[in-house]
Amino acid sequence: MGIMSKILGGGGTHSTEDYVELSLDDFDTARAEAGMSVHIAEISEQRDAMAIKDAVYDGDLVIADITRMSPSDSVVDRVLEDLRQVAREVDGDVVVKEDDQVIVTPTGVKISREKL
């Protein structure tokens, strides 16, 4: 019986004694530093956009809730334009989802406009 047959289970029957129970405690689970973080934010006024811009410049993705702002408010337009500018500058992406959320991504991260 070749190695591939053993791996893929070709032929023969197996019992529970053929398998070994593994515990994560037996392995080094040290994790590498994350390259990007995902931040959740709320925007209620224009100055709230500063922290979002800083996070995107630092290479992080931000999902911001804009429900506290009136859609007819001119501040919303200014905030969204600021976030679009940041996305352009870092070659990221920005999308407004159903008038209540804004997603801003850093360099190299694009947002699909198609639902899964």
Image: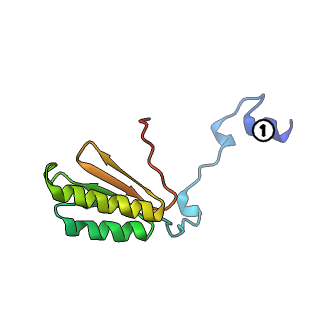
Which corner quadrant holds the N terminus?
A: top right
Q: Which of these two is toward me, 89 or 112?
A: 89
The reply to whether residue 38 is visible in this rendering is no
Q: Position of residue 72 (x, y in %)?
A: 14, 49
Q: Choose top left, top right, bottom left or bottom right for residue 5.
A: top right
Camera-nearest residue between 3 and 110? 110
Residue ID at (66%, 41%): 17
In depth, the one of 56 and 33 nearer the eye is 56
Label 1: which secondary element:
helix
Q: Is residue 43 left or right of residue 106?
A: left
Point 20% across, 65% down: residue: 46
Position of the C terminus by quadrant = top left
Which residue of the protein is positioned furthest toward the right in this rendering? 1
In this rendering, would 97 be left or right of 26?
left
Question: Is 20 situated above or below 78?
Answer: above
Image coordinates for residue 85, horizontal then vertical, percent:
37, 62
Quick check: 38 above or below 12? below
From the top left corner, tell me how far across and down residue 32 is, in percent: 54, 68
Q: What residue would you read off at disc 1?
A: 6
Residue type for callout 1: Lys
x then y, percent, for residue 66: 21, 54
Residue 17 visible in the shown view: yes
